Amino acid sequence: MSDAIYGRPAPGATRWVQLVVGIICMSMIANLQYGWTLFVAPIDAKFGWGRAAIQVAFSVFVLTETWLVPIEGWFVDRYGPRIVVVIGGVLCGISWMLNSVVDSLFLLYVSAAIGGIGAGAVYGTCVGNALKWFPDRRGLAAGLTAAGFGAGSALTIIPISKMIAASGYQATFLAFGIGQGLIVFVLGWILRAPQRGEVAAPAPSHLRQTDRDAGPGQVLQSPIFWVMYAMFVLVGAGGLMATANLAPIAKDFKIDAVPVSLIGITLPALTFALSIDRILNGVTRPFFGWVSDNIGRENTMFIAFGIEAVGIWALSTFGQDPLHFVILSGLVFFAWGEIYSLFPSTCTDVFGSKFATVNAGLLYTAKGTASLLVPLANVLKDYTGSWHTVFIVAAIMNAVAAAMALGVLKPMRAAHHSAAQVRAGGMAAR
């Protein structure tokens, strides 16, 4: 049986305090990924390194952010979340402070690696902590935590854009790097893992949650893990491509500065799109997490990934109109961000909560694998002369993942759960 002994929730809304602190910490590291696109053009204008070379830094960031999470998760599961998040906040601050003075691609990549390590430490820890505190609402809790990362940059997109225009990208890196890193450093000291008996009762049986804990070695031997990994890569690649290249795409469409009026607000198309995208990318995580708590993980994946495939195709077809660009890019991000709540919660449902941080971290490395395709998107665009082919490939990848959710993952999980029940029944009969 799991070492996490279920009991009544911790007194005084303790777990909600832990959740809120995790969300705030996540929002403070969001700009390292979602604000990056605003800096690409200014860096290229200053040094002339080329977009493709500059975007390698984005891939370096995502790779170090994701592929080191299992190691950071091991430390969290062994020593607790506090120290890992505090160190992560320091590294995130150093990264952007270094970005303010880099004068070579090598230093840009080094800075990206430092930021990736720090962001991964914060991200993996906060998500893992939420999964442990909320076994009864795992999808919602993971979604709310991931929403901090998805929507955390929404309130700062306009200030960052204005500061870059007024003071330059270097001063912007420095100011926001210090501020964001300091907040994570302070709040990180509040975090802790649940003690025995503090967590709520397990979720309803229709979610097929295990009461046995699998270690990382067992997880890596499970076919279910690798099916989820492949699906994560397929869906993640398209969203990361849009995240890293939304500003260049808008410039190539020649609509980035065209005013768009929507819901009583008028902003340049790119600024409007970035603001709405960040909000919807955050909202989708708790929304689809909550949906998955009620209708099942795989059913929710099928719906979300299908919407993403249609949204990417529509953005390619109709996105050169400024208004359509704003609306459709929002749809793309809304149907993409849920992977950061659905996959961690599904992983913990299958493999248990004791090693939730490291196991979810192993699955999260799929984001790093997907990031390797981001520079290839620029190469494909340069080869074909347009973004159309890139969009179509991304749409097909999402459609395949949607089909896999119902056709492959769902029956595999059902068989795995049935076999586990049979084994448990046999042991009880002894």
Image (cartoon, rainbow, N blue to C red):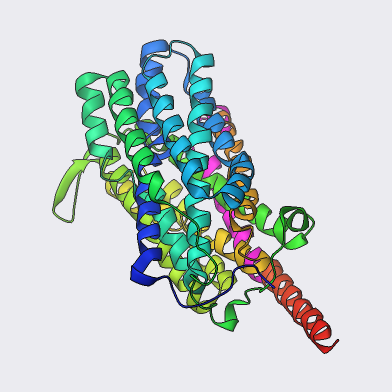
Q: Residue at x 51, y 41 (%)?
A: 121
Asked whether residue 335 is in view, the answer is yes
Find out whether residue 323 is within the magenta segment.
Answer: no
The C terminus sits in image quarter: bottom right
Q: Where is residue 94 drawn, in percent x and y? A: 42, 25
Residue 427 drawn above or below residue 369: below
Q: Where is residue 249 drawn, in percent x and y? A: 41, 35
Q: Residue at x 57, y 59 (%)?
A: 343
Q: Is residue 143 left or right of residue 157?
A: right
The boundaries of the magenta stretch are 380-406
Find out whether residue 383 is within the magenta segment.
Answer: yes
Residue closer to the observer: 86 or 388: 86
Q: Residue at x 69, y 65 (%)?
A: 213
Query: Quick one: which residue is furthest to the bottom in this view?
Result: 429
Q: Where is residue 360 drawn, in percent x and y? A: 60, 54
The rendered magenta stretch, by its main secondary structure, is classed as helix
Q: Residue at x 19, y 42 (%)?
A: 267
